[in-house]
Image: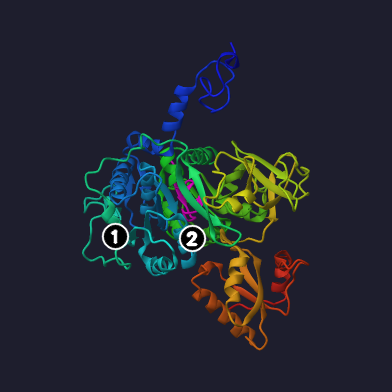
Amino acid sequence: MSITDDVPVGTAGTAGAPGTAGNTDYDPSAFRQVFEHNFTWASAVERNIHRYAHRTALTDSVTGASWTYRQLGEVTGALVAGLAAHGVGVGDLVGYQLINRPEFAFLYVASQGLRAVSSPMNFRLAPAETAHILSTSRPAIFFYEASLAKDVATALELSSFRPPVLVEVDAPAGDESGAGAGAGDEGERAGGHHSSTPDPAIPGALRFADLLVDGAPSFRAPTDGTVWDETSRLYTSGTTGMPKAVPLTSLNETLSAHDAIMHFPLGPTDRTMNMSPWFHRGGNYCAGPNTMFYVGGEAVTLPQFEPGLVLDLIQKHRLTYVIGAPTNLERLAETQEAEPRDLSSLSGIVTMGAPLERAAALRYQATLTKRIANGYGTTEAFWNTYLRPEDLPDAAGAAGRACLDDDVAVVKVYDDRFADPTDTIAKDGSEVGEVIMRTVKSGYAYAGNPEEQAKKFRDGWMYPGDLATWDEDEIVTIVGRKDDMIITGGENVHPVQVEEVLAGHPGVADSIVTGLPDPEWGEIVVAYVVRRTGQLPDEAAAAAELDRFCQDSVALARFKRPRRYAFVDELPYTATGKKQHYLMKQQSASDAQAGLFVTP
């Protein structure tokens, strides 16, 4: 008998898809109950806490402390209780602006134990950018690095919202973070207060230790949690340069972990270290805590990239994978060639953020490891194409084929509308279109920003604005961007934000900020400046003055400031008065070769 004969639409047989009929009279409601409540990312962590109780889950490369999965359960359970005691509950945002350190991982796990939302922020943001996030997201609690206290204090002054609870996280040497609770440590319990530690720099702020509750039960996935809960809220740059909030569900968390596990591949015996900041989607979710705590492997922290240190840590901890941008690999190769380490433990290196050129791929394969892979993606959708080790070096420069559970197409570009996913360009490797993707790793939204959301998402597809070609094997090659974003060292810089800061200088009449190709950073930020009459007459002094002006700005992160200046008489505009950034980007390399740029 057909389900459509006897069962109304939306009742028995439809549990997996509300409002639609199944194809038989089978009732999947029991499966749906298990799927929705036990396929959460938090459920996977809870399983590993007892399944791999004595295996190492996390190692702090700074202090050498480590946590087994049992200990991970203990410290995150103590943190769950502490967060709850300080008013954090279902749906509340737990904001934190931290480097790659154990506390980051603990907060990521503990937030999900309360059905709260983990919300990491870029620790490199300018105070005005942090203030924007605080004002719009209104976190119930905010954790920050002690070393960033001055900028955080400025952000709090600029923000229209002050989180009810502030928590300062000290350097590992203070040992109030839980580093003392690692495997093999018989000293003071995690979070023990040390009298030698100074009070928090921001009045009223707590210490991380204050949130760890003695005797609390081990971490448990919330019984009322579902795969549809929002569990993370990440941030990416918008067209104005201010961050956009990217919500992710627990199901996104789980399927992102599955994706990385399949593509590396990864297992519970792997030890990984991501050289990118964990606040990035490609940091936490690419063999960072998201993936490793799900598969039962070990994540090793790296607070700051230094090539010699990374090579030493590979050798010391017998790491199986390291992950980072091509700029990281370039510096690793240089250092390994000068002073070789034992890298025989590596199963591979995965890189993201930019393509690998053939000569670079061959060098890294010879110097670091034979197995080099490259992923392409976004904050909103994780990675969606993957260039496998066997694709190199023949497909060097490409972004690879669609990931296993993703649909990827390269469609025609129109000024006034989205191209339909079936309106594809030729698979000839030369025609240029926009690469789009449909993926279960995206939340398909920008929280509180429907205008920007409408520009990126349509009918289950994401239109990220990247231009690409593809060939008959559907290998995608990224060739540029529809917008004018600059990507320097894996970080996004939008020209408009920098131009607005420069416009605040009395000597600047106009400017166009763009990217200049750079072998180490991918691109560096450069500015073409029109000076006001009689102002900034000496170019060298002018470049130094504008560099100082940008560094002093509370609205601009230091990594976004121009590193070169060219002083010109006029800038190109369209007939409707829009700056033509792409023209300056096209000529920046030749201008650099001609010596037009001045370095501060």
At label 1, the amino acid type is: Leu
- 412 versus 23 height, above or below: below
**Which segment is the magenta one?**
269-288
Tag 2 residue: 307
Q: Is there a contact, CB below 8 Å, between mark 2 and mark 1? A: no
Magenta-drawn stretch contains 376:
no
Residue at point 39%, 70% (across, down) = 150
Depth check, front residue: 479 or 77:
77
Residue at point 78%, 67% (across, down) = 575
Instruction: Give residue 474's quadrant in the image.
Output: top right
Q: Main secondary structure of the magenta part?
A: loop
In-image side of 344 versus 2 (left or right): left
The picture places residue 161, in percent across and down from the top left corner, at 41, 61
Q: Which mark is residue 206?
A: 1
Earlier sequence position, callout 2 versus callout 1: 1
The picture places residue 113, in percent across and down from the top left corner, at 36, 42
In-image side of 102 versus 321 (left or right): left
Depth check, front residue: 40 or 592:
40
